[in-house]
Amino acid sequence: MAALKIGLFGGTFDPIHLGHTYIATRAVQTIGLDQVIFLPCRQSPHKNKQNQASDQERLDMCQLATAQLPWAEVSTYDLDAPAPSYSWRTAEAFRENYPDADLYWLMGADQWNHFDTWHHPKYLASLVKFLVFYRKHPPRQHAEFTHQTIRGLHPASATAIRQAERQSLRNQWLHKSVRHYIKKHQIYA
């Protein structure tokens, strides 16, 4: 029997948008992942500023955005763990919970291109395989690390979404339920 293939998809998800679920869907379609676990992080070690939405709001939005995806799960692991949210620590915990599964770490090419600056990248590489999503330019090659690529096009940007929400512009990059949640709670107003 083949091992379960699980994708770990961490991020601030401030807010989660159609681009995030598009990347996860492409990973399911092209790699054959059985499950994708979305992991909203408490504080990314790669970002200096605080999240604009609270931890609970980002968790709620992730749950709303993935509710109709039978292969998706949202985990509070990174929100419950001490800050900052180190990927190796998350992968280590999921390796212990799923010892026989093939674990994959989903990330964008922008993250992969700076992967060698992450905290304990070699250890993380011993725990997971890397799936790197890119739009136009293939990700760089690392001498010590290998990856599989997933190509696709989606224009969504969390920064652009927050700006549009501040200006009360209709945003086509949000899941309908997430858009209603943001409006109801006036998260980015």
Image (cartoon, helix red, strand yellow):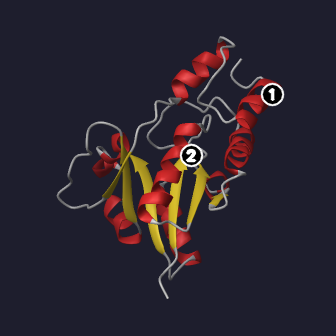
Q: Which numbered dot is residue 21?
A: 2
Q: Residues within 10 Å of mark 1 (few under 14, many from 20)?
A: few
- Please, is residue 14 above or below residue 105 in the view? above
- Where residue 64 appears, as percent x and y from the top left, is 73, 45
The amino acid type of the residue labelled 2 equals Thr
Q: Residues within 10 Å of mark 2 (few under 14, many from 20)?
A: some
What residue sits 31% from the left and 64% below the top?
122
What residue sits 69% from the left and 13% below the top?
168
- In front: label 2 or label 1: 2
What residue sits 56% from the left and 41% below the top?
12
Foreground of the two, 90 or 27: 27
Q: Marks 2 and 1, Cα distance to the nearest angstrom? A: 22 Å
Q: Is residue 85 visible?
A: no
Q: Which of the two labelled residues, at mark 2 and mark 1, occupies the earlier sequence position? A: 2
From the image, tell me which residue sits under label 1. Answer: 185
The tally of labels here is 2
Name the element at disc 2. Answer: helix
Mark 2 and 1 residues: CB-CB less than 8 Å, in contact?
no
Name the element at disc 1. Answer: helix
- Please, is residue 139 above or below residue 131 in the view? above
> From this viewpoint, which residue is outermost toward the left?
143
Q: Is residue 185 left or right of residue 63?
A: right
The amino acid type of the residue labelled 1 equals His
Which quadrant of the view contains residue 81? bottom right
